[in-house]
Image (cartoon, grey):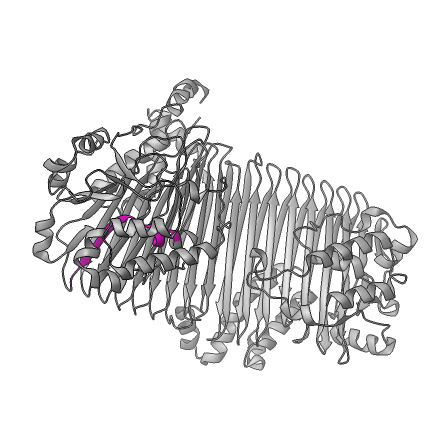
């Protein structure tokens, strides 16, 4: 294996591919957080009075909350007064209606990322609501969606156009007091996506959003709300890459999903934010609250995530299985390399009868990274016949990394059937030997084995995401073996 | 509680054996931190809040005839070999026998050891006091206990039976604190059965066991708990295993109102191996919490753990099994499983198998299940003409028996099988089958 060391060194030392910075004048408020800043954000977005009050209530509660310390991650304290809470590309009132109107510099950014937005959107039949910094700049395929009655727009637009829906569902899954970062998000969120699928509609295409973080010192606080009305179906894709930067950036998003009777939501994420350099400098802090509420009978919420980026990831996409026979799923691949830290997992709260949940979590640690799975399966006394299967496997690459598993299982119904299994191991030398002996390079062999390890999760991803995810995984682990 | 402990210290310091300075420091350190609370992750599911207000007293002298009668009721029949008996924390010499011990195997009263030759390393040699604070309370105020030492190369084959009996008193809430130190020198082997049982009114038992296993030694330890339904017991088992040492721990909980066991095993040198077997059967409103932690601190160390639980009534069981693999501790194999059988609608189980791994050449796994009896197995028995209750009882017993058969000491296994069957409905019928 030593022969490959030079090549590996080279690969390890490769810079973050997507590191660049787009110079667009930002309409940014000075750093700091107080009620005036929140009123400014709210006014800037022309929000109704109730939403401003909602934000202020969240802010006042946030002030009383301690910073959570329980996760298996370490980072210097965040100075919340040093963050600027609003930044929008110029001409916010004059939002472009088509790609032609989009600032060419933005398009340049997308090109650098290898995401030819227009082409890709047309070819793949995907509507893309690209969020650049905090204001949505383009929304495509709106008309086609409109025909089906699907509402897919930026959050600010939803507040203006569909206030009754927003007011009814906002905060109903993740209350403002839920946790420290959710409260902060509720107070200062700038934009995000809103999706409403009407009764009985199967969304004609996969919905996707690309998030970017731009402009130095800007924390980004996204708010996503997806409501699937009775008997509807939607698949939502979220993917991220970010420009290179030295200071740590805080990202505290909130995603709320509501599935009513017989509805199904599939939420897929590929997260590839800047993880920091080899010494752990820079990189995104990704403290996200994602939760789905299976409110109606026979509803289903499925989370699929591929997490390769961010310096610190702290996220637990969860399902509240309230409706009878509702189903929750969580498929996750989390990769941590160099000095990345990931503390991720899920919560499955079984409330309704015959609710079922599946958790498949694959953690890969390399370099000096720490990767933890933290999960909760709770079966309440009302959840007659609840069923859970959990499998969390960890793969270790290198002798300085860590893999940890903290699964909480709380069963309060005797008819519940819960299975949990976890394994931790490194890539078998016999597996590696077999591949090398068949003429594969070590790098390819490792990629193949790792992809095989993650297969169960990739299978759940929409086609084009699955391809992207595999490539991403290979890039993330480049040089990790030796 | 805190004030009453200080009072005890003032009243009894002179009578307690050992180094008064060490005891006082332990007491002050314990009082400064107080009892663990549910705000601490390690105590999330188990509350000792009711002890906060309790007025605990240290047990006074016991009536010999009464003690002897109680011993006769509780001691495991058929267990020959060396034995020490403690009632309410005090040694009962007429109930002990230590005849015919092999040369090099010493079984002594800890109080006597401390009185005759108090060396600093008799207490708190292994226990991590910052992690397990209740040991400090034991160190401060324990009255007596046992020290079992096997010298180099000695094979102490006959199990050493240590019976700790607690007789609850209606007038005072007694704090009984058994203490055991097991030392196995190089290549020695020793087997110790700690049997905790009790009767009568409420009492609080705070037991601490320390095991020091030198290179190549083998220790087999049993902690059998059959306390009265009114008793609360917390017990800390702390072991340190040197090169190629092996430890097998059997942990059986069949009684008690509030039970908390902390097992902490440290594998400090290559080749050390530990096996933990556990069984808990909770009924009524009992609460049994098992916390185990195995630290793989050196390469080529191995561990296996299998805890099984049967829950009935409105009881609650907690299991938290942590396996830690330290940096550079390569070639580790660690496997753990926890299976729970829920028999009633109101019971609750909270299980959390944990892995914390900082090395890469490891094979670690854990599994946890919560479920009911297998419907097909039940159907099979029914189709053979068994009624529902008997079929259920048999399958439940079979589930528990897997741990019991591993005990390896026939009289003990027989006794525990009897207790388990006694806890099941229709036990007379079940006895016909087993």
Q: Nearer the viewer, residue B394 or B20?
A: B20
Q: Nearer the viewer, residue B269 or A7?
A: A7
Residue B267 falls inside the magenta stretch: no
Can residue B160 be seen in the rendering of this structure? no
Picture coordinates of residue A315 (x, y %)?
39, 49
Looking at the image, residue A237 sits to the left or right of residue A200; the answer is right
Q: Quadrant of the N terminus of chain B?
A: bottom right
Q: Residue at x 37, y 70 (%)?
A: A385
Q: Nearer the viewer, residue A146 or B188?
A: A146
Looking at the image, residue B409 sits to the left or right of residue A281; the answer is right
Picture coordinates of residue B79 (x, y %)?
75, 66
Q: Nearer the viewer, residue A477 or B191?
A: A477
Picture coordinates of residue A157 (x, y %)?
19, 52
Looking at the image, residue A202 sits to the left or right of residue B239; the answer is left
Q: Start and end of the magenta stretch?
A: A184-198
Picture coordinates of residue B163 (x, y %)?
76, 66
Q: Is residue A30 above or below residue A360?
A: above
Q: Residue at x 40, y 30 (%)?
A: A246
Within the image, what quadrant is residue B289 found in? Answer: bottom right
Looking at the image, residue A178 sits to the left or right of residue B88; the answer is left
Can residue B105 be seen in the rendering of this structure? yes
Within the image, what quadrant is residue A59 found in? Answer: bottom left
Q: Quadrant of the C terminus of chain B?
A: bottom right
Residue A191 falls inside the magenta stretch: yes
């Amino acid at each position: 294996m030593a022969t490959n060391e030079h090549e590996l060194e080279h690969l390890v030392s490769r810079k973050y591919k997507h590191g660049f910075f787009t110079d667009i004048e930002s309409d940014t408020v000075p750093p700091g957080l107080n009620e005036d800043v929140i009123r400014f954000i709210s006014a800037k977005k022309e929000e109704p009075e109730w939403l401003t009050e909602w934000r202020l209530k969240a802010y006042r509660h946030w002030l009383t909350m301690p910073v959570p310390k329980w996760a298996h991650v370490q980072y210097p304290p965040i100075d919340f007064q040093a963050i600027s809470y609003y930044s929008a590309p110029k001409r916010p009132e004059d939002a472009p209606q088509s790609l032609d109107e989009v600032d060419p510099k933005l398009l340049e950014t997308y090109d650098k990322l290898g995401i030819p937005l227009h082409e890709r959107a047309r070819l793949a039949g995907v509507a893309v609501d690209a969020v650049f910094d905090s204001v949505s700049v383009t929304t495509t395929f709106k008309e086609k969606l409109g025909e089906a009655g699907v509402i897919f727009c930026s959050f600010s637009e939803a507040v203006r156009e569909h206030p009754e829906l927003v007011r009814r569902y906002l905060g109903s899954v993740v209350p403002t007091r839920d946790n420290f970062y959710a409260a902060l998000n509720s107070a200062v969120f700038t934009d995000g996506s809103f999706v409403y699928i009407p009764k009985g509609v199967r969304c004609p295409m996969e919905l996707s959003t690309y998030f970017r973080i731009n402009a130095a010192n800007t924390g980004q606080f996204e708010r996503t709300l997806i409501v699937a009305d009775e008997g509807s179906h939607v698949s939502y894709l979220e993917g991220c890459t970010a420009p290179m930067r030295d200071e740590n950036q805080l990202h505290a998003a909130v995603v709320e999903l509501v599935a009513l009777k017989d509805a199904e939501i599939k939420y897929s994420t590929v997260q590839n934010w800047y993880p920091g350099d080899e010494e752990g400098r820079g990189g995104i802090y990704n403290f996200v609250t994602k939760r789905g509420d299976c409110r109606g009978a026979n509803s289903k919420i499925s989370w699929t995530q591929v997490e390769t980026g961010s310096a610190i990831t702290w996220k637990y996409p969860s399902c509240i299985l309230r409706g009878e026979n509702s189903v929750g799923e969580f498929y996750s691949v989390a990769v941590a390399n160099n000095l990345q830290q990931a503390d991720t997992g899920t919560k499955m709260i079984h409330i309704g009868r015959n609710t079922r949940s599946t958790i498949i979590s694959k953690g890969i640690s390399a370099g000096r990274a720490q990767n933890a799975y933290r999960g909760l399966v709770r079966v309440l006394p009302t959840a007659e016949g609840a069923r859970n299967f959990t499998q969390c496997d960890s793969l270790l690459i290198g002798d300085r990394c860590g893999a940890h598993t903290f699964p909480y299982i709380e069963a309060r119904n005797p008819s519940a059937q819960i299975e949990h299994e976890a394994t931790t191991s490194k890539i078998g030398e016999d597996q590696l030997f077999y591949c090398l002996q068949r003429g594969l390079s070590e790098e390819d062999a490792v990629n193949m084995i790792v992809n095989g390890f993650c297969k169960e999760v990739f299978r759940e991803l929409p086609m084009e995401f699955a391809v992207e995810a595999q490539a991403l995984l290979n890039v993330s682990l480049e040089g990790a073996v030796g | 509680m805190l004030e009453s402990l200080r009072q005890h210290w003032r009243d009894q310091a002179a009578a307690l054996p050992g180094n008064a300075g060490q005891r006082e420091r332990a007491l002050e350190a314990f009082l400064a931190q107080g009892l663990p609370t549910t705000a601490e992750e390690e105590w999330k599911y188990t509350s000792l809040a009711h002890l906060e207000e309790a007025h605990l007293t240290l047990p006074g002298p016991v009536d010999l005839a009464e003690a002897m009668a109680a011993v006769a009721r509780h001691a495991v029949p058929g267990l020959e070999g060396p034995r020490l008996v403690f009632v309410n924390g005090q040694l009962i010499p007429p109930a002990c026998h230590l005849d015919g011990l092999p040369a090099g195997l010493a079984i002594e009263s800890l109080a006597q050891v401390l009185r005759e030759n108090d060396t600093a390393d008799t207490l708190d040699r292994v226990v991590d006091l910052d992690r397990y604070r209740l040991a400090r309370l034991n160190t401060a105020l324990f009255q007596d206990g046992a020290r079992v030492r096997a010298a180099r190369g000695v094979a102490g084959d006959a199990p050493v039976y240590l019976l700790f009996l607690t007789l609850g008193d209606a007038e005072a809430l007694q704090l009984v604190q058994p203490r055991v130190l097991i030392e196995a020198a190089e290549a020695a082997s020793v087997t110790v059965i700690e049997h905790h049982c009790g009767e009568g009114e409420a009492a609080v038992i705070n037991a601490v066991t320390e095991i020091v296993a030198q290179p190549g030694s083998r220790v087999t330890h049993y902690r059998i708990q059959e306390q009265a339904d009114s008793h609360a017991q917390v017990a800390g088992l702390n072991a340190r295993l040197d090169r190629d040492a092996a430890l097998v721990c059997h942990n059986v909980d069949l009684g008690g109102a509030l039970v908390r066991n902390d097992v902490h095993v440290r594998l400090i040198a290559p080749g050390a191996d530990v096996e933990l077997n556990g069984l808990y059967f909770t009924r009524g409103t009992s609460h049994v919490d098992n916390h185990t932690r195995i630290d793989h601190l050196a390469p080529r160390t191995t561990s296996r753990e299998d805890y099984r639980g049967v829950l009935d009534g409105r009881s609650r069981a907690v299991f938290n099994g942590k396996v830690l693999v330290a940096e550079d501790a390569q070639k580790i194999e660690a496997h753990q499983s926890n299976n729970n059988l829920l028999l009633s609608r109101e019971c609750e189980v909270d299980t959390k198998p944990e892995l914390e791994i900082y090395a890469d050449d490891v094979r670690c796994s854990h599994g946890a299940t919560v479920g009911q009896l297998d419907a097909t197995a039940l159907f099979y028995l029914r189709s053979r003409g068994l009624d529902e209750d008997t079929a259920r009882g048999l399958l439940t017993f079979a589930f528990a028996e897997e741990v019991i058969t591993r005990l390896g000491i026939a009289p003990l296994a027989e006794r525990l099988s009897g207790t388990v069957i006694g806890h099941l409905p229709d036990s007379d019928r079940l006895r016909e089958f087993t």
